[in-house]
Amino acid sequence: MEYCDYIAHLISKMLFAADAVSDGLLVSVDSPRLDLDADGVFQSTDKFIHVTDLKGNTYLITVEAI
């Protein structure tokens, strides 16, 4: 059993909450997204979180079972 969903959910939730009580430098923290191909077919248990800061820079956080 892999816990990518759970770990990605915690990262997303805690990152948003921590930023709210500290410097508030993040504009958005997206919900975790599935690893799907162009046709929407499930590819792996990997999860992706997009984050955007105040300057418009975007970041990709990947949770991957290794």
Image (cartoon, rainbow, N blue to C red):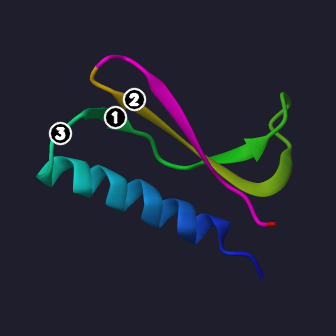
Is 64 one of the magenta-colored residues?
A: yes
Q: Is residue 6 above or below residue 32?
A: below
Quadrant for the C terminus, please.
Answer: bottom right
Quadrant for the N terminus, please.
Answer: bottom right
Q: How far separated are the C-alphas under marks 3 and 2?
A: 12 Å
- The quarter of the displayed image where residue 49 is located: top right
Q: How far separated are the C-alphas under marks 1 and 3?
A: 10 Å
Judge left or right: residue 46 versus residue 39: left
Q: Residues within 10 Å of mark 1 (few under 14, many from 20)?
A: some
Q: Is residue 6 above or below residue 50?
A: below
Q: How far separated are the C-alphas under marks 2 and 1?
A: 5 Å
**Contact? badges 1 and 3 (CB < 8 Å):** no
Q: Secondary structure at mark 1?
A: strand
The amino acid on which the numbered mark 3 sits, given as a three-letter code, is: Gly
Judge left or right: residue 5 versus residue 29: right
> Label 3 belongs to which residue?
24
> Label 2 belongs to which residue?
52
**Contact? badges 2 and 1 (CB < 8 Å):** yes
Q: Secondary structure at mark 3?
A: loop
> Label 1 belongs to which residue?
28
Q: Residues within 10 Å of mark 2 (few under 14, many from 20)?
A: some
Query: Whole-percent x and y of residue 36?
Result: 79, 41
- The quarter of the displayed image where residue 27 is located: top left
